[in-house]
Amino acid sequence: MSENAGGPALDFQRVYEEYSPRIRRYLGRLAGAAEAEDLTQETFVRVNQALASFRGEAALATWIYRIATNVATDRLRTPGFRVSARSAEPARLFGLGTLPLVEQDIARREMSECVRGYIAQLPANLRAVVVLSELEELPDRQIAEVMGISLGAAKIRLHRARARLRELLERGCDLSRDERNELTCEPRPREVSPLD
């Protein structure tokens, strides 16, 4: 058990159990599923080391997201890092229910994988705000705290990130909405030049 300077004791084990699933999901979206476990462990090593000095100036969740974002950004900057966006194995999905539901789930996963591929092409600072906003559903104020920037800067960065992502998607996909009004993406065939 560790003490924070601004209040009652924080138990690392409870903090880990409560936040690790969300942080693992966030890091998987930010850096790829193959990296999520290692990045989550690194994040919570840092959380454990700093928990005693946590002053409560931000919400605990915001503080942990900020540490996770820094860990991911450090990894994304390393030479040779490649994002590997892989969905769950389709064979595993066949045990989940009827074939039409499985086909819908596979189509959703393919769409998600397609969009994640485009998100992965964004620079790290833009990728982080898109993931925090669109996938983690954090409010702008909390995104600003996680990123260590002003609310105005967070809104501008999010606007730029969405515009850049939209541009990438429109260039590489035919976008539409399905019967549930969810965005769908059909990748366009790559144009082949005579030199290919």
Image (tube, helix red, strand yellow):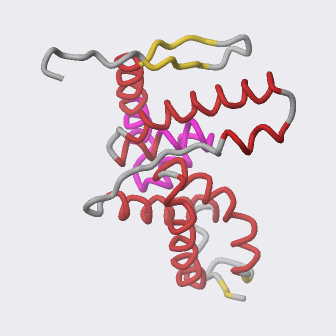
Q: Position of residue 16 (x, y in %)?
A: 69, 72
Q: For the point 43% across and 60% down, which residue is it?
A: 72
For this orientation, the residue located farthest to the left is 195
Q: Is residue 86 above or below residue 158?
A: below
Horizontal relation, residue 133 to residue 81: left or right: right
Q: Is residue 55 left or right of residue 167?
A: right
Residue ID at (48%, 49%)? 30
Q: Main secondary structure of the magenta part?
A: helix
Q: Is residue 46 above or below residue 88?
A: below
Q: Position of residue 180 (x, y in %)?
A: 73, 15
* Quadrant in which residue 90 is drawn: top right
At which x and y percent is residue 38?
A: 52, 69
123 or 111: nearer the eye? 111
Q: What count of labels does the image hold?
A: 0
Asked whether residue 145 is drawn in magenta, I would say yes
Q: Nearer the viewer, residue 52 or 193?
A: 193
Relative to 169, say whether 71 is above or below: below
Along the line of sight, the residue nearer the viewer: 114 or 46: 114
* Nearer-the-camera pick, 86 or 76: 86
**Percent of width and height locating residue 124:** 36, 48
Q: Is residue 101 left or right of residue 118?
A: right
| Residue numbers of the magenta segment | 130-159
Give the quarter of the figure containing the C terminus.
top left
When asked about the image quadrant of residue 119, the answer is top left
Check the picture and name the quadrant holding the N terminus: bottom right
Taking the magenta stretch, the answer to whether it contains residue 68 is: no
Q: Residue at 25% across / 62% down in the picture?
A: 79
The residue lying at 56 percent from left, 64 percent from top is 63
